[in-house]
């Protein structure tokens, strides 16, 4: 616990400084680097050679650069976010039916590779777009980040002290329904705060925004469970060891990979 808290105390100010003070180009480069580490960790699920993991990393970076070059094209942005939303709805079903869908228990490498692209590329697009969005792009991105941090913390403490009923025992035996409810409530408090103070929404639009927030918080739990599903299928405890007490990059951003693209798509749909 002490290690987790110390790591968070160090990492949190750095993350906030990047969100608020880096220009769009610098923030994009940072996101590429962070998600590049995530791509390397995801390559571990492939169970391939180091050379093959390097190739997968290069493929992900090519995707980041390609999307960065086309980021101002509305059709590309909308298509990327829509594909991400469809994928995460499919992932919701996949988590429920696990281990079905993995054949004999060893996931197909092509399936794992494609899944990694669906997880990582839209996350890059969503984070960079939110940070540059008008007005107050950094605050809009902070709403998503705070939503995830609150949900993760709420789930951890509610599960630790109240957890009794397993949420998805075949995917992640440590997670409980009590933890999920605690995380959902904590995340929704941030959503409400964002709607009132960041977006300054009036009653009708605020209600729609809260529905969006509820869907996004729920999908963030799916994002967490999806990475856990792949770790369990490949017998990997942590995706990496970059953050002491927290695991790797993917262990820290698994919820964000589902939340950020779907949140941004919802903002576009609601014209917020």
Image: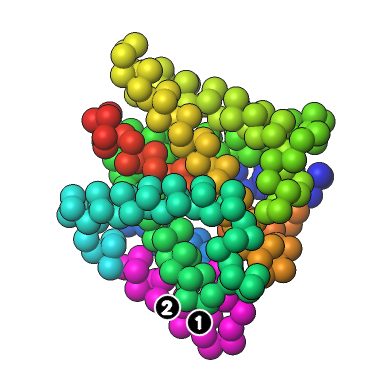
User: What residue would you read off at disc 2?
Assistant: 58
Tag 2's secondary structure?
Answer: helix
Residue 109 located within the stretch drawn in magenta:
no
Q: Main secondary structure of the magenta part?
A: helix
Give the farthest residue toward the top: 203
Residue 63 located within the stretch drawn in magenta:
yes
Judge whether 160 appears above or below 224 on screen. Answer: above
Judge whether 68 appears above or below 203 on screen. Answer: below
Q: Residue at x 40, y 76 (%)?
A: 59
In the picture, measured across the screen, residue 150 lies left or right of residue 35, that is right
User: Magenta stretch?
Assistant: 41-65
In the picture, measured across the screen, residue 214 lies left or right of residue 151, that is left
Q: Quadrant of residue 155?
A: top right
Residue 131: x and y, percent?
Answer: 36, 44
Tell me, yes or no, whether the two marked residues, 2 and 1, touch with CB atoms within 8 Å.
Answer: yes
User: What residue would you read off at disc 1?
Assistant: 54
């Amino acid at each position: 616990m002490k290690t987790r808290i110390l790591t968070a105390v160090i990492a949190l100010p750095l993350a906030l400084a990047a969100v608020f003070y880096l220009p769009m180009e610098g923030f994009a480069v940072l996101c590429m680097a962070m998600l590049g580490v995530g791509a390397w960790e995801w390559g571990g699920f492939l169970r391939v050679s180091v050379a093959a993991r390097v190739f997968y990393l290069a493929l992900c970076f090519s995707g980041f650069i390609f999307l960065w070059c086309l980021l101002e094209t509305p059709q590309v942005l909308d298509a990327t976010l829509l594909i991400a939303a469809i994928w995460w709805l499919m992932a919701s079903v996949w988590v429920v039916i696990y281990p079905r869908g993995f054949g004999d228990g060893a996931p197909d490498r092509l399936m794992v590779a494609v899944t990694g692209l669906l997880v990582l590329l839209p996350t890059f697009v969503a984070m960079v777009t939110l940070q540059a969005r008008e007005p107050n792009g950094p605050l809009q991105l902070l709403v998503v980040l705070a939503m995830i941090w609150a949900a993760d913390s709420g789930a951890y403490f509610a599960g630790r002290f109240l957890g009794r009923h397993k949420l998805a025992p075949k995917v992640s035996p440590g997670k409980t329904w009590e933890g999920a409810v605690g995380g959902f409530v904590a995340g929704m408090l941030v959503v409400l705060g964002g709607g009132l103070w960041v977006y300054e929404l009036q009653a009708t639009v605020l209600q729609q925004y809260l529905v969006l927030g509820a869907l996004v918080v729920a999908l963030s739990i799916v994002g967490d469970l999806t990475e856990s599903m792949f770790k369990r299928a490949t017998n990997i405890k942590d995706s990496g060891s970059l953050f002491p007490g927290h695991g790797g990059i993917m262990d820290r951003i698994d919820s964000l990979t589902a939340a950020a693209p779907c949140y941004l798509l919802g903002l576009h749909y609601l014209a917020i």
